[in-house]
Amino acid sequence: MPGALGAQRTAVVVGTGPDIGRACAVAVAADGAHVVCFDRDESAAEASAEAVAAAGGTATSAVVDVTDRAAVREALTKVASEHGHVDVLVNVVGGSDWSLAAETSDEEWDRSFVLNLRQQWVVAQEALKVMTAERGAIVAIASVSGLTASTRHGAYGAAKAGLISLVRTLAIENAGRGIRVNAVAPGTIATAAREGDDHLAARIPLGRRGRSADIAAAAAFLASDKADYITGQVLVVDGGVGVRHSLIDL
């Protein structure tokens, strides 16, 4: 299946459970890559590979705990060995607790940084060891919370801000190898985890919450040759929320 990524490219999508991760796997496969679906949940990884196949692409699955560096290294080495190369990495893994910054526990803080920043660093490090030079692309799923403040999101926002900084640093450090590194920053997305938040649509200029496919389309674009001259950037996908002036809005 030819496309913007080229029929021979191999893409690893990390965190392919329902919603955004699965949509990213399908979208990247639609651009012509063979996708390897990583998830700590075997059934989720397999279901994503099946979703890719149902959409006309090719995919395999692997059970990987991305908080375990040895497991990440082994899984990525295996992908490179089986396919000859790793060209694209899309990392969707993240998660948050809701608490005031002054009331956030050490455990909540550490958990947020492990899920949203440390594992992104670990996975990117290990992927760079086996990634194809001159055509490699890394896309991290960040958040608008890493760009602007939000109550009860202190740890999550700080970790995502750190992720955005990491993306920019990796972009500069690996530009000479021809490997591009970018991020997508979603706003509020209608996922199973955020069910019941439909009232937020009234505050969004485009009049609706985001869909998983919106984020997947942005990630697939940044991973593709169409974005060949884009690196170190954060593509905000929030329906226009971030451009509204909070004090003067006539």
Image (spheres, helix red, strand yellow):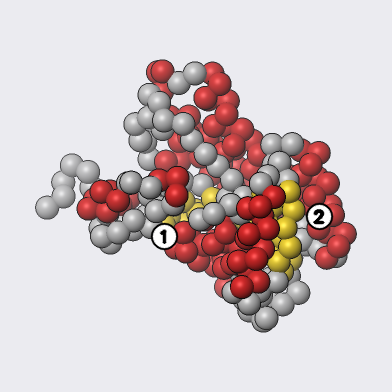
Q: Which of the labelled discs sits on residue 211, or is there none? A: 1
Dot 1: element? loop
Horizontally, is 9 left or right of 90 in the view? right
Horizontally, is 194 left or right of 170 in the view? left
Q: What's the CA distance linking mark 1 and mark 2?
A: 32 Å
- Corner quadrant of residue 13: bottom right
- In the displayed structure, 70 sits above or below 29; it is above
* Foreground of the two, 170 or 30: 30
Look at the image and tell me in which quarter the N terminus lies: bottom right
Dot 2: element? helix
* Foreground of the two, 164 or 115: 115
Who's the residue at 59% across and 74% down the image? 55
Which tag is nearer the camera, tag 1 or tag 2? 1
Who's the residue at 81% across and 39% down the image? 70
Q: Amino acid at mark 1?
A: Arg
* Foreground of the two, 248 or 114: 114
Q: Residues within 10 Å of mark 1 (few under 14, many from 20)?
A: some
Q: Amino acid at mark 2?
A: Val
Q: Is residue 57 visible?
A: yes
Q: Is residue 29 visible?
A: no
- Corner quadrant of residue 29: bottom right
Check disc 2 and report the residue beneath it: 130
Q: Position of residue 16 (x, y in %)?
A: 61, 54
Horizontally, is 122 left or right of 140 in the view? right
- In the displayed structure, 176 sits above or below 193; it is below
Horizontally, is 83 left or right of 111 in the view? right
